[in-house]
Image: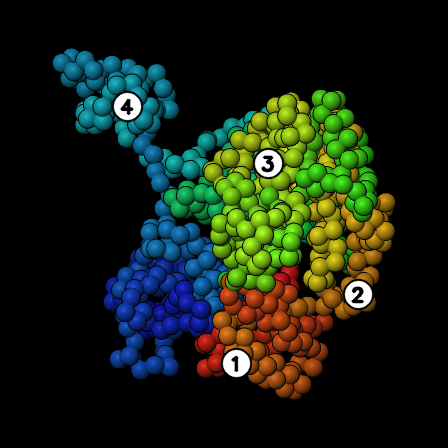
Amino acid sequence: MPDSIPHHSPRILRVALPTPLRRLFDYRPLREPPACGWQPGLRVRVPFGRRQMVGVVVECIDSSDLPPDRLKPVEACLDATPLPEDWLWLCRFTARYYQHSLGDTLHQALPVLLRQGRPLAGRMRERWQALPPSAEAEARLARAPRQAELLAMLRQHHHGLPTQAVLAQSFSREQLLALVDKGLVERLLDPLTAAETGAGRLLAEPALPLNREQAQALATVHERLEAFHPCLLHGVTGSGKTEVYLQLIEAVVARDRQALLLVPEIGLTPQTLARFRQRFRVPVVALHSGLTDHERLDAWEAAASGRAPIIIGTRSAIFTPLARPGVIIVDEEHDGSFKQQEGLRYHARDLAVTRAKHHAIPLLLGSATPSLESLYHAERGNYRHLRLTRRASRHAPARLELIDLRGRPRQGGLIPPAIEAIRETLAAGHQVLIFINRRGFAPTLACHACGWLADCDHCDARMTLHRQPPMLACHHCDKRRPVPDACPSCGSADLRPLGSGTERTEETLAALFPKVPVHRIDRDSTRRRDAFEHMLGQVRRGEPCLLVGTQMLAKGHHLPHVTLVVVVNADGGLYASDFRALEHSAQLLIQVAGRAGRASHPGRVLVQTLHTDDPHLRMLAQQGYDTLAEQLLAERRAAALPPYRFLALLRLESPKEEAASALGGEAAAMLRHWVAAHAPDVSCLGPVPAPMERRQNRYHLQLMLSSARRSQLHAACAQLTAWLEASPEARRVRWSLDVDPQTLA
């Protein structure tokens, strides 16, 4: 698809529309072209069936496969200038690599208001500034004393005042406009987000001194600030990776370039923003799902125009256009939340690599527990491997202490040695983090008389018991129902919760330590806006307290007063069917352990497990994540799994099991026949039932493709999607293709 602007007025516009169809649609252009001329990147409103849609012009051509009289005309051009070229390039690459509709990719990469056809313009704020004195004009204020008072106030503020500040002083907008008419005041409009700050010092506070390892890592990145330079910053928790980010961004912004920082969770965004805004005088904008549509468009436009030198965001921020790209940083690069699991299944970290290469700028991937893919690239020399082995607190990272759960009584999931360690830590005036990666009161409800379990009617899963409010809830399909008074199977009233969730552990700790505040932090307790940050603010005051939380607390949070971490049960991911489960569990354990001992006191980590003799768990506890990662890479190589082989997963789902099974069988047969002739390196496994076969009353099957050559895998994926789009049976089955899947669930 050509990017160049045609030298003549095109007869046909090829438009990408937000549909699942992997094709473009031809339209006739308006008779009067936009001032910039027709070119790729312009948004247009077009008729599509019985409705109107907003699409993006992708090509300008002279002929179409359809006769001219069958082509509908474009109804309106929505832009005076095209959308940024780097943004359009990234969307094209993403659609091609992830085998997704280009129209839907463009749609997902745009802020909501731009999808709706709103102008690409951020909101503006009025500012009123006094003009140089004029004797003739001021003489006319003799009979307007309030206007004279207003003018005197404005003259005290050389940079002017916004409307709200003026109105707060009991002046009116009419008085402001009267002064404008008299030539004494001018009305200015400033962007609401990332207004120009003018020349001056870049830093609001001085940078912190770096230790030898930090300084060496920063110098390595500095060597090639004008070229693609991927680096893996592999630093233990608390080793000062963020300070390296800050000083790298300082160097980039000083060159009048922009920096994009990706963080894994929306919960990390406020504290990261606060630290960056405290350090820099220049605008720092955020992009994440917690913003309103107007706030998101304001930040997007500020980045696209270049007014915002520093952009911090979650996964979708990778699609933020940059006027002057200078560096891309991915914090906690191993985190699974960088992978979109629905619709357009892109991986923001991998797109960051591609985008940095396209712009010829440095890329910095930071983590205490790097993904096996990133370690693989570092071993092969594709990435520079930068290590930070020392903590800023000078204490060594806490070792994992394995505690055997077998045969021991439990209270809220905690055994006596853990409870005693909690009591000692609180008595010393410190804080304790109890990590339990299961929200709710208990994993399920059971009848002690007949063994009945509270199963979900729609999924192959148990319903979780909640106490606040009382209910049974499925965390897969969100079905909810009241807690029964008696067993539905035998009528017994002896119903008991099985296992522990965050609510039950919170209740137990509140009873054991009634004078100590207990803060439960999970998805249920932080639904209200700013609730998470409010709780963390209470914790950071430093008084002894107990934190009960899920993985929301495990990532990147600086909790200087936590000296003990208790992992209630470490066994959840050790024996899962997914080949990445052990890697992800090890990363999570090390990340949550890293919350302990980050300040002046050393930390301790207790890990409760039923499998203290598990060789992988013992290796992690005794030798650390790096040694375990080497072992897992060797196992992946022997098993021909990523990163030594590339995968794609076709997911099929239908209310009728036989429909999904029949389509999967036909797709597999077609693919094996095609592969034998065109891509012999590609192997095809399945179709097989998904790990959770029935979910939301739909049956789920999977077909896996793998290859040692990425090009052959993508050719097979393209053949498969083309066949599915042409298959009548595929219209009755929901299907999706996941390139580079991060989970097999």
The mark found on residue 723 in the picture is: 1
Percent x, y of residue 139: 17, 15
Name the residue furthest left: 143
Q: Is residue 145 left or right of residue 209?
A: left
Task: Say which label, 4 or 1, has the lower sequence index.
Answer: 4
2 or 4: mark nearer the eye: 2
Marks 4 and 1, how far apart in space?
64 Å
**Residue placed at 49% from the left, 35% from the top?**
530
Give the residue pinned by disc 3.
520
Quadrant housing residue 367: top right
The mark found on residue 167 in the picture is: 4
Q: Secondary structure at mark 1?
A: helix
Task: Say which label, 4 or 3, has the lower sequence index.
Answer: 4
Percent x, y of residue 550: 63, 43
Q: Is residue 371 visible?
A: no
Marks 3 and 2, how far apart in space?
41 Å
Toward the viewer: 284 or 100?
A: 100
Give the residue pinned by disc 2.
637
Quadrant housing residue 489: bottom right
Q: Secondary structure at mark 4?
A: helix
Q: Is residue 152 visible?
A: yes
Percent x, y of residue 728: 45, 82
Task: Say which label, 1 or 2, has the lower sequence index.
Answer: 2
**Residue placed at 65% from the left, 51% from the top?**
448
1 or 3: mark nearer the eye: 3
